[in-house]
Image (cartoon, helix red, strand yellow):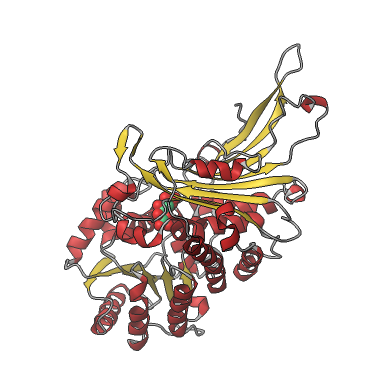
């Protein structure tokens, strides 16, 4: 496949137009956990290196593990060495780490909140911080109520008012495990915080290509006129992961791929592909447009759940030469577990634009590679001229937005092969962010943390969207329960999922893209 590139463009982060970021304190509930070490602290550190962090800030991690500030900084430093996008610079780290603190506390114990308030105020006095606070809930949802009430009682959750420091709360997934539990979480957070203070994170919305979806659609004249049922044959959204469940079995056993990935990441991607043009980039206008898509999703009921969904679990296999145990033999997984590690869904957005266009979604763990993309396949051309041979049809045009591992975009077109005879061949016009813009994209959490600091909620999930996607997903979960399916299809780790998933798409005369 050939590739085309525009010339390399260098735009440094400092040239980006960003609103001013006010000094603030970030309090991380679950501060000693994996997310803080792997994603949050590396994200803040990279914002610092890129000159995007406010000049004055503090981070206070809260957790049950007993640790001093110094010990906490040490564990974070190790995390940075492993997970930071940009290399660890000792001098920068040393200055950065002086802004990081740790408090031992139990989220569920009311006395924690008085200590938290005292510690936050003491740190804020020391740095001359104005009292803007962001509370990051990187904890199980079962503790959300206690945290919100604790913050409220301690006077740490003031509603927004002019000339008053802000309080914002970031809610990590899972926001529930079905519609009822999602509503309960939203009730609890909504009792204490105004919707404008709540940032429900879906880190896929912070990924470069995901944001580029709107730009491709609405900053080019080429695509939007053909972005509808007249020209689009179908859409494929794939999020494939090479790793198995790893150390997260306790959570995953209760979740499974439908709840873990489709309910949030893949449905959000679908919304961005399918939504109508919003009339402005105002967060609520964009979120209204996405909400409309969720409202138009055709429900999948017990009657057709087997026709439109496939769930499966991985068995023992190998990936890149390394053995992967079967899911049921992973640490922390029940030997008779029926949790799905793979899901494929065929769905429809029932509106004028997308009438009868199938959207095929698939995601799974222990697949051959980490590869994610949104691919829009256009309809075939008429069977005349270069497509006259019915035995060898021309491959249709495909626009693929690559989310990972390399972020970019490619367009498949048919071209003439140079020579004396008329011969055609598909070629790919592609661009890769890293190559064209001369610098790697920031990690999703960098962008999203910065968004919270400036109070921009566009890339966060609004309450109604969370509940609408859970309503659709819960119907599938209930249909699975009622369908009486006696066995769960299997796929060998390191392969592209079960044969049932191939049949799901092949029955429509289509195939999954090879990634
Ligand atoms: C998380 C899921 O939301 O996303 C994980 O809980 C999954 O199970 C992860 O591995 C994938 O994120 P990314 O950014 O690595 O594609």
Depth check: give the residue in front, 49 or 486: 486
- The residue lying furthest to the top in this view is 420
Q: Is residue 21 visible?
A: no
Measured as percent of width and height from the top left, residue 506 is found at 61, 40
Is 250 placed left or right of 158 in the picture?
left
Total marks placed: 0
The correct choice, above or below, for 28 with respect to 82 in the image is below
Measured as percent of width and height from the top left, residue 128 is found at 33, 75
The correct choice, above or below, for 149 with respect to 509 in the image is below
- The residue lying furthest to the right in this view is 384
Is 141 placed left or right of 392 in the picture?
left
Is 438 placed left or right of 491 in the picture?
right
Measured as percent of width and height from the top left, residue 93 is found at 28, 54
Q: Residue 471 occupies which quadrant of the picture?
A: bottom right
Q: Residue 268 occupies which quadrant of the picture?
A: bottom right
Measured as percent of width and height from the top left, residue 469 is found at 55, 66
The correct choice, above or below, for 300 with respect to 163 in the image is above
The residue lying at 34 percent from left, 50 percent from top is 245
Q: Is residue 84 visible?
A: yes
Depth check: give the residue in front, 161 or 219: 219
């Amino acid at each position: 496949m050939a590739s085309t590139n525009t010339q390399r463009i260098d735009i440094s982060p400092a040239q980006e137009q960003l609103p001013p970021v006010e000094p603030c304190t970030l309090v991380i509930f679950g501060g000693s956990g994996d997310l803080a070490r792997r994603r949050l602290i590396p994200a803040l550190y990279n914002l610092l290196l890129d000159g995007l962090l406010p000049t004055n800030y503090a981070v206070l991690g809260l957790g049950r593990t007993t640790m001093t500030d110094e010990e906490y900084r040490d564990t974070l430093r190790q995390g940075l060495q492993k997970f930071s996008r940009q290399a660890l610079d000792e001098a920068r780290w040393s200055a950065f780490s002086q802004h990081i603190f740790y408090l031992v506390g139990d989220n569920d114990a009311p006395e924690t909140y008085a200590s938290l308030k005292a510690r936050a105020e003491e740190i804020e006095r020391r740095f001359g911080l104005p009292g803007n606070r962001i509370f990051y809930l990187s904890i199980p949802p079962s503790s959300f109520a206690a945290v919100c009430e604790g913050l409220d009682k301690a006077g740490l959750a003031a509603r927004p008012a002019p000339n008053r420091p802000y309080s914002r709360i970031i809610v990590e997934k899972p926001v529930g495990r079905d519609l009822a539990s999602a509503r309960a979480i939203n009730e609890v957070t909504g009792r204490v915080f105004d919707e404008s203070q709540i940032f429900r994170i879906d880190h896929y919305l912070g990924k470069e290509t995901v944001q580029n979806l709107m730009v491709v659609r609405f900053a080019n004249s080429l695509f939007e006129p053909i972005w509808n049922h007249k020209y689009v044959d179908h859409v494929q959204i794939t999020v494939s992961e090479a790793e198995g469940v790893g150390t997260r079995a306790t959570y995953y056993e209760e979740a499974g791929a439908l709840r873990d990935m489709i309910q949030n990441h893949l449905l959000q991607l679908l919304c961005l592909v399918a939504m109508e043009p919003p009339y402005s980039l105002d967060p609520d206008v964009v979120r209204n447009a996405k909400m409309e898509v969720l409202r138009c999703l055709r429900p999948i009921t017990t009657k057709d759940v087997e026709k439109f969904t496939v769930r499966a679990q991985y068995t023992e296999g190998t990936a890149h030469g390394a053995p992967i145990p079967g899911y049921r033999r992973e640490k922390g997984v029940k030997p008779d577990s029926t949790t799905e590690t793979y899901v494929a869904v065929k769905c429809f957005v029932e509106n004028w634009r997308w009438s009868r266009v199938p959207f095929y979604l698939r995601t799974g763990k222990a697949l051959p590679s980490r590869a994610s993309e949104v691919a829009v396949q256009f309809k075939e051309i008429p069977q005349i001229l270069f497509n006259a041979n019915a035995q060898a049809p021309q491959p249709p045009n495909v626009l693929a937005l690559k989310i990972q591992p390399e972020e970019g975009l490619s367009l498949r077109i048919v071209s003439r092969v140079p020579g004396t005879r008329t011969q055609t061949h598909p070629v790919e016009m592609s661009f890769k962010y890293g190559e064209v813009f001369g610098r790697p994209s920031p990690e999703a959490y960098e962008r999203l943390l910065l968004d919270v600091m400036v109070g921009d909620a566009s890339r966060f999930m609004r309450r109604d969207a969370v509940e609408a996607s859970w309503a659709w997903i819960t119907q599938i979960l209930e249909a699975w329960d009622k369908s009486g399916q006696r066995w769960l299809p299997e796929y060998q780790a390191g392969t592209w999922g079960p044969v049932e998933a191939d049949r799901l798409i092949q029955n429509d005369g289509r195939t999954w893209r090879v990634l």
